[in-house]
Amino acid sequence: QGANAGSGRQRPTPLGGRSPNAPPFDSTGGDNPSNEPSGFERAGSPSPSPTALRSGAWDEESTVLRAGESFGELALLYNTRREATFRAKEDAVVYAVARRHFLACFSRVGGFCSEYCKLLEEVHCLSLLVSSERWELACNANGLVDFKPGERVITQGKPRQANQWYVIFSGGCTMSLNTIGSDGQESKEVLSELRRP
């Protein structure tokens, strides 16, 4: 449906029996549950996640957006303030996309995403995933981390510093287990050598 962009300086006017101090939007889902946010974006405000716009009021409009058109992408791409005020011109439902998901779409166009996807196709424990699920996992990767020979990636018995899952992109790693025998002596056993096929 339609939504309009104004100068961002006009004051909302009450609708019907609405209180003059009430915000110019209707809640969605009665008690406005967190999974169905509602609200409006005001010019000069920080850039939160987009929300579903509902009926509201306005003073002056500069343009009207219809179904299939979008707004708010510049603030998400460049992390800037809103350059205009968008209010629902009539009862409208707007498809909302969180900033991290919006930016993820652009990272999938190039870079290493295709290479990551090929890598995950070689991982046996991911064989049950369909190609679209592996693609989603590849596009959400933190990136490549380089390790020098002998440098430890994970240390046995130490708390993990980050919740990460590792897949070898190139090179190889050795998995070992340190044990203490009955004589109190510590020994190291090499369990496996991991390498990309």
Image (cartoon, rainbow, N blue to C red):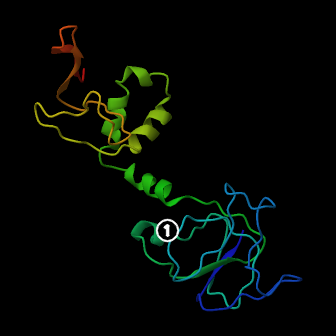
Question: Image check: 152 left or right of 86?
Answer: left
Above or below residue 17? Residue 186 is: above
Q: Where is residue 42 in the image (x, y as percent from the top left)?
A: 59, 80
The quadrant of the rendering that contains the N terminus is bottom right
* Residue 187 sits in quarter: top left
Above or below residue 39? Residue 107 is: above
Residue type at mark 1? Glu
Q: Residue at x 74, y 79 (%)?
A: 24
Q: Residue at x 61, y 60 (%)?
A: 96
Residue positioned most to the top? 182
The quadrant of the rendering that contains the C terminus is top left
Residue positioned most to the left? 149
Q: Residue at x 81, y 61 (%)?
A: 30
Looking at the picture, tell me which residue is in the foreground, 178 or 107.
178
Q: Where is residue 89 in the image (x, y as percent from the top left)?
A: 73, 78
Q: Say whether residue 192 is visible.
A: no
Looking at the picture, tell me which residue is in the foreground, 135 or 152.
152
Residue positioned most to the front? 183
Looking at the picture, tell me which residue is in the foreground, 99 or 177.
177
Above or below residue 124? Residue 118 is: below
Which residue carries the number 1 mark?
73
Above or below residue 178? Residue 58 is: below
Looking at the picture, tell me which residue is in the foreground, 187 or 61.
187
Q: How many marks?
A: 1
